[in-house]
């Protein structure tokens, strides 16, 4: 029997990273006895091993809690967790679309940070009821007054009714549960309207196929119902519906306002896309529910298996990963140096890094990742436009380029005023355009810069961290394409361009970067029997040249009757070593050179 | 130019024989050879075991064309033991006319008595392990002799009218080119017909390897030796060997010609009927094994193309290189042409590919590994 919508509250917790979101979630689960305390492990909702290790949330995990309120009513509270990192912003908006309210957690010691603002605005935009919570009030450095002032001044939210809380020692948790019931409105869907539910996530199970996470808006759904995905038109018969306790537990039906899962023998994730609306096949809803904007990858890199014969293993792994993480895209590509691999698209650097690590941990694939790059738009003199996902997509003749556009982001930084100087310097180095600065309190500054995404993904986070000793917080949004004076730099070895070493950069940085790549290659490519020139070039114009001098001495000193076997083994080893190198023309290039190039691009400044 | 493919027939109707003497005055810090300072009873044990090994082989071997007694340091054996050793060899083998018999000697242990004994026997060549004429350098190497002893030993051997070779070493830590020039100049002043030059290398398991000293590249030293020795009339006939015409070491040439040889004594290696056999390296094990049979601890046989490529690498160590007609006859035409094709990929200043033969140039000698690694199987 479905739950009465009046007794349901659907909410998320939103916070800046490290402000205690997961700890608060754990405490709510514990207080409502949803999970026996002996089964509690810290940060219960972070199901991926990786999430728990890094203390971040990537995948959404809903949980259903039963709560008896002070008014004597039995309520069902559905918590839909949200990821904290900006890379996963799209998942935040997905979670929020399934909720009527959100708890906005602010660290009482840290105050409002960049993502607090971004996430709060996402929630406001979706029309959610917000409950401000000032967490970590047990800390000596906690200042709820300052947190309140910042919440009102920076975000513009009324903080007078904020809950003071310590998720760590349990202070304020009861009040939060009560406020969820009183401050967040119940879902409004109708029971007698045709069934419509939003798919807010899905996972793939080897036995059951796709498991869709749904939020029912109107009507209800139960096993054996015939349903249809509105975007794809695919029809299925429902096998099972259930709720998250947080383990999956089958129930008879899911009614309006309820959050749960649905299994319907769906074999491919593309047939049941996240953001799609599920409806009844016989009595469909007139229009799909408002979905989410389709997220497009912004950062691309090549993934190549370290063992070349593992290419099929990598393909399988990527396919499975994509089922769980629909934001990943991939397409086959090949490189002269690295063999066969895939050009993969991600939402950001962390997303990319996590995908790589999951491929290794969950699928046992070890891979080489090429340096990340963004998608450029190249306007050609003949009027055509190329979208480039890799340097080799650029026209080989630079005179065919009319103009190159690159993606820009607007980065908002919150930082103590002592670090404003280094931060501005960093943004300028990264070709940033100043777009605003204000003092949000006498000590804290909001700095806004427009930055090329390419510079941002290179090492902006790391540089920012060291420039501000970790005291800055950051949020960003994409603001579209702008023209930039970008060039493709080719690296020529023995006069032959080597595709794996080409890169795109601003014209002013071309010499410097070309030089460091050439210098690194000079260091890593062993001397050959002849002199090998390494050049960096823009089109036909050579901008850098270094030479690897010819090998001049390499000889086994002596070899008499007793040495023959040992010397032969040494030579065989030498030959084996050379065989493992990539042969480009007459030049042997060790694999390490390609690997190191991956680093150079990021070492680079 | 002499061709390769000189079979023992060309060498003089016979076989090559190597006898290892596992004793030294002192263990040099860089040495990885099987050798140890003599302890009481060791010489006797060694001679008895050697005698048993020769008996156990019971081969009706053809006459010996070249004999090389090396070590260790054969001159460490006392004249009395030498007398016994000569007796054992003479009873075990016959020698062809004009056989080349080389003995290694170290200046620290060589005496007039040794020289007279050898003179009275069949010894034709003495190879003196000088290494340097600089006391500082000798001390660094842990050699048991000083420069004065080296000069005296050389004089002794020259006076006895042996064909004398001396070993010189370059590439010591902090060595300057001038140090090496001075050393080579002194070496040449004795007018020997043969000089071997070796670069100091770090061998696993030696005291040196544990110190892991920084060593010079040695390019300049080696290149200078190539130039200087040639100017003094000593032609480079192998990577490490320089000789006046006719003074080349025939015993070593046989190794590089992929010729057969018998090896006797601890750690010695023999190569007969395509099989390389190595003896137990330590005297105790060696002696014990000779009580039961042959003291062999390992065997290796290369087949077909691998054997041919091994032979090609050995041949390319010498100035004669590979003479294709002979090579094709010994190892087959297909593999000969395959190797020829491999060699033709090298620039002419490294490998000379002539109609008759392919060989390394002086620059090629300096880059031998890079060439050999290409053609080894």
Image (spheres, coloured by chain):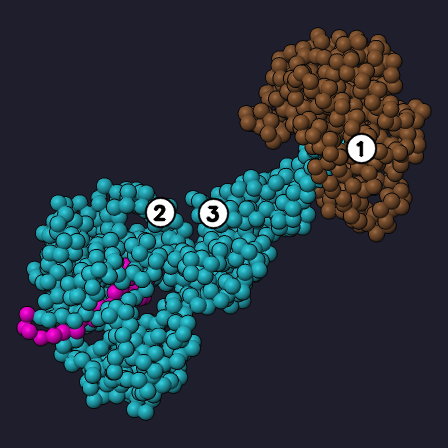
Residue A52 in picture, x, y percent from top left: 31, 56
Q: Secondary structure at mark 1?
A: helix
Residue range corresponding to the magenta coloring: A70-92
Q: Is residue B185 left or right of residue B93?
A: left
Q: Secondary structure at mark 2?
A: helix
Tell which of B261 and B50 is nearer to you.
B50
Question: Was residue A88 drawn as part of the magenta stretch in this picture?
Answer: yes
Tell which of A517 and A369 is nearer to you.
A369
Residue A179 in picture, x, y percent from top left: 10, 66
Can you say which quadrant of the picture contains the N terminus of chain A? bottom left
Q: Is residue B323 above or below residue A69?
A: above
Measured in 3D between alpha carbons, the distance from the residue under mark 3 to the one under mark 2, in whole angstroms, is 14 Å
The answer to which quarter of the image holds residue A264 is: bottom left
Residue named by callout 3 = A599
Residue named by callout 1 = B56
Q: Chain of mark 1?
A: B
Chain B, chosen colour in render: brown
Residue A566 in picture, x, y percent from top left: 69, 37
Residue named by callout 2 = A462
The answer to which quarter of the image holds residue A149 is: bottom left
Measured in 3D between alpha carbons, the distance from the residue under mark 1 to the one under mark 3, in whole angstroms, is 63 Å
Tell which of B176 and A47 is nearer to you.
A47
Q: In the figure, the cyan chain has which letter?
A: A
């Amino acid at each position: 029997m479905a739950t009465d919508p009046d007794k349901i509250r659907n909410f998320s917790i939103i916070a800046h990273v490290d402000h205690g979101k997961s700890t608060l979630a754990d405490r709510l689960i514990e207080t409502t006895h949803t999970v026996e305390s002996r089964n509690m492990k810290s940060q219960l909702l972070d199901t991926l091993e990786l999430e728990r290790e890094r203390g971040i949330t990537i995948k959404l995990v809903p949980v259903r809690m039963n709560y008896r309120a002070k008014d004597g009513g039995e309520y069902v509270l559905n918590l839909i967790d949200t990821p904290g990192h900006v890379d996963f912003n799209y998942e935040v908006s997905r979670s929020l679309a399934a909720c009527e309210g959100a708890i906005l957690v602010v660290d009482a010691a840290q105050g409002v940070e960049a993502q607090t603002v971004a996430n709060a605005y996402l929630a406001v935009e979706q029309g959610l009821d917000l409950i401000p919570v000032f967490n970590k009030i047990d800390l000596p450095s906690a200042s709820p007054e300052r947190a309140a002032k910042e919440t009102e001044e920076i975000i513009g939210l009324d903080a007078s009714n904020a809950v003071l809380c310590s998720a760590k020692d349990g202070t304020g948790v009861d009040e939060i549960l009560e406020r969820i019931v009183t401050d967040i409105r119940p879902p409004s869907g109708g029971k007698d309207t045709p069934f419509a539910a939003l798919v807010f996530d899905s996972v793939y199970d080897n036995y059951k196929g796709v498991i869709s996470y749904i939020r029912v808006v109107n009507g209800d759904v139960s096993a054996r119902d015939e349903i249809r995905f509105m975007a794809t038109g695919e029809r299925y018969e429902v096998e099972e519906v259930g709720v998250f306790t947080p383990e999956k537990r089958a129930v008879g039906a899911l009614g309006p306002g309820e959050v749960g899962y649905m299994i319907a023998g769906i074999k491919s994730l593309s047939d049941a896309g996240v953001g799609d609306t599920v409806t009844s096949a016989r009595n469909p809803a007139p229009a799909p529910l408002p979905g989410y904007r389709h997220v497009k990858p912004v950062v691309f890199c090549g993934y190549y298996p370290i063992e070349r014969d593992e290419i099929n293993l990598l393909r399988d792994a990527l396919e499975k990963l994509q089922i769980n993480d629909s934001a990943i895209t991939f397409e086959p590509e090949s490189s002269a140096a690295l063999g066969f691999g895939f050009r993969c698209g991600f939402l950001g650097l962390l997303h990319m890094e996590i995908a790589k690590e999951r491929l290794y941990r969950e699928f046992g694939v070890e891979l080489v990742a090429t340096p990340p790059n963004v998608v450029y738009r190249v306007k050609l003199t003949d009027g055509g436009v190329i979208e480039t996902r890799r340097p080799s997509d650029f026209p080989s003749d630079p005179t065919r380029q009319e103009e190159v556009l690159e993606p820009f982001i607007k980065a908002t930084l919150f930082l103590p005023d002592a670090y404003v100087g280094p931060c501005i310097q960093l943004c300028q180095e990264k070709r940033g355009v100043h777009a605003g600065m204000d003092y949000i309190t006498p000590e804290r500054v909001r700095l806004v810069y427009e930055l090329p995404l390419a510079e941002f993904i290179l090492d902006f986070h790391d540089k920012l961290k060291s420039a501000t000793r970790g005291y800055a917080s950051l949020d960003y949004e994409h603001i579209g394409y702008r023209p930039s004076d970008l060039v493709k730099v080719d690296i020529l070895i023995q006069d032959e361009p080597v595709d794996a070493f080409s890169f795109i950069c601003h014209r002013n940085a071309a010499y410097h970067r070309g030089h460091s790549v050439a210098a690194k290659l000079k260091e890593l490519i062993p001397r050959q029997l002849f002199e090998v020139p390494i050049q960096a070039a823009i089109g036909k114009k050579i901008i850098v040249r270094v030479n690897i001098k010819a090998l001049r001495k390499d000889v086994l000193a002596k070899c008499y009757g007793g040495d023959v076997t040992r010397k032969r083994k040494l030579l065989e080893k030498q030959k084996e070593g050379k065989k493992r190198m990539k042969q480009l023309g007459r030049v042997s290039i060790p694999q390490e050179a390609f690997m190191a190039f991956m680093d150079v691009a990021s070492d680079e400044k | 130019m002499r061709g390769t493919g000189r079979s023992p027939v060309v060498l003089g109707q016979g076989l090559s024989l190597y006898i290892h003497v596992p004793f030294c005055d002192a263990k040099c810090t860089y040495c990885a050879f099987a050798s140890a300072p003599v302890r009481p009873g060791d010489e006797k044990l060694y001679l008895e075991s050697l005698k048993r090994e020769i008996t156990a082989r019971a081969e009706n071997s053809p006459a010996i064309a070249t004999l090389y007694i090396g070590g260790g340091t054969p001159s460490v054996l006392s004249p009395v033991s030498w007398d016994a050793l000569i007796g054992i060899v003479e009873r075990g083998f016959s020698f062809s006319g004009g056989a080349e018999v080389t003995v290694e000697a170290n200046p620290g242990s060589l005496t007039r008595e040794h020289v007279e004994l050898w003179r009275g026997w069949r010894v034709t060549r003495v190879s003196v392990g000088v290494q340097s004429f600089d006391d500082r350098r000798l001390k660094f190497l842990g050699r048991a002799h000083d420069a004065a002893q080296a000069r005296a030993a050389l004089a002794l051997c020259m006076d006895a009218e042996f064909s004398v070779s001396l070993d010189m070493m370059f590439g010591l830590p902090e060595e300057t080119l001038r140090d090496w020039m001075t050393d080579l100049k002194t070496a040449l002043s004795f007018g020997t017909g043969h000089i071997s030059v070796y670069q100091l290398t770090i061998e696993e398991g030696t005291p040196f390897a544990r110190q892991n000293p920084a060593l010079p590249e040695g390019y300049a030293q080696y290149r200078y030796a190539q130039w200087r020795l040639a100017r003094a009339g000593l032609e480079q006939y192998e990577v490490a060997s320089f000789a006046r015409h006719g003074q080349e070491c025939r015993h070593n040439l046989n190794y590089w010609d992929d010729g057969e040889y018998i090896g006797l004594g601890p750690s010695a290696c023999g190569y007969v009927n395509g099989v390389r056999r190595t003896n137990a390296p330590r005297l105790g094990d060696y002696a014990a094994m000779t009580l039961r049979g042959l003291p062999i601890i390992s065997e290796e046989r290369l087949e077909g193309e691998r054997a041919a490529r091994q032979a090609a690498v050995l041949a390319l160590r010498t100035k004669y290189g590979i003479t294709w007609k002979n090579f094709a006859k010994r190892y087959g035409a297909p593999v000969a042409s395959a190797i020829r094709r491999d060699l033709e990929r090298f620039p002419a200043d490294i490998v000379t590919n002539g109609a008759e033969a392919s060989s390394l140039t002086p620059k090629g000698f300096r880059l031998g590994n890079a060439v050999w690694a290409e053609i080894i199987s």
